[in-house]
Image: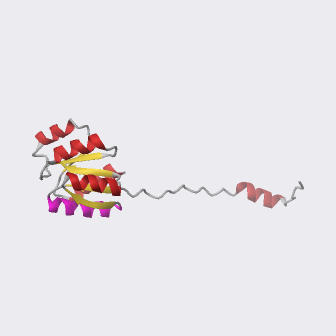
Amino acid sequence: MSRINLPSKMKDLARSTPIPQFKSFSFPTVKKILLVDSNPFVANQFGQLITQLNHLSMGCLSSIHTIEKFIETKSPDLIIINIETKGNIDGYQIAKILKLDHEFPLYILYREDNLVQKKWAEELNPDGFILYSPNNSVLKNQLQLLLN
């Protein structure tokens, strides 16, 4: 291998020129999120906030049969269950069934004035809790922490 003889000024310049440092960049992972709730206002609020945070809101369901069929075909990355969901079975029972039958993150949404239901939900050992707030910025901050 032959060596290239550069003039000394060029060698000095080559030694003194810093090598640019590039920061690594990765694209954020979009999470597919299913909401279990019987309240259309809360469902709409969450859907909008999830979309604003650049994640995919897969919709809102409240029937365990519909939820089970949906999970089989769509595979959400995580599920947020409002403990106050009403229907043939309530949010607590839906959370219990899903926690026993599936292996995905499960988060419980509760209201501050309903701490009894939160206590029941703690028995299920969910991946986390979300304290409901009608204030979008408060709720958005909680979701952002949960999704990152």
40 magenta-colored: yes
Q: Is residue 142 visible?
A: no
Q: Is residue 81 visible?
A: yes
Q: Nearer the viewer, residue 10 or 147?
A: 147
Residue at position x 26%, y 52% in the image: 68
Q: Which corner quadrant of the image does residue 7 belong to?
A: bottom right
Q: Using the rendered view, name the quadrant where residue 49 is placed.
A: bottom left
Picture quadrant of residue 10: bottom right
Q: Is residue 46 left or right of residue 38?
A: right
Q: Nearer the viewer, residue 37 or 89?
A: 89
Q: Which image quadrant: the N terminus? A: bottom right
Query: Depth check: 148 or 101 in front?
Result: 101
Q: Main secondary structure of the magenta part?
A: helix
**Left or right: where 114 falls relative to 19:** left
Q: Is residue 43 left or right of residue 57?
A: left
* Residue drawn at 39 percent across, 58 percent down: 30
Q: Which residues are magenta?
A: 39-54
- 122 relative to 112, above or below: above
The structure residue drawn at horizontal position 31% and vertical position 56%, both measured from the top left corner, is: 33
Is 60 included in the stretch rendered in magenta?
no
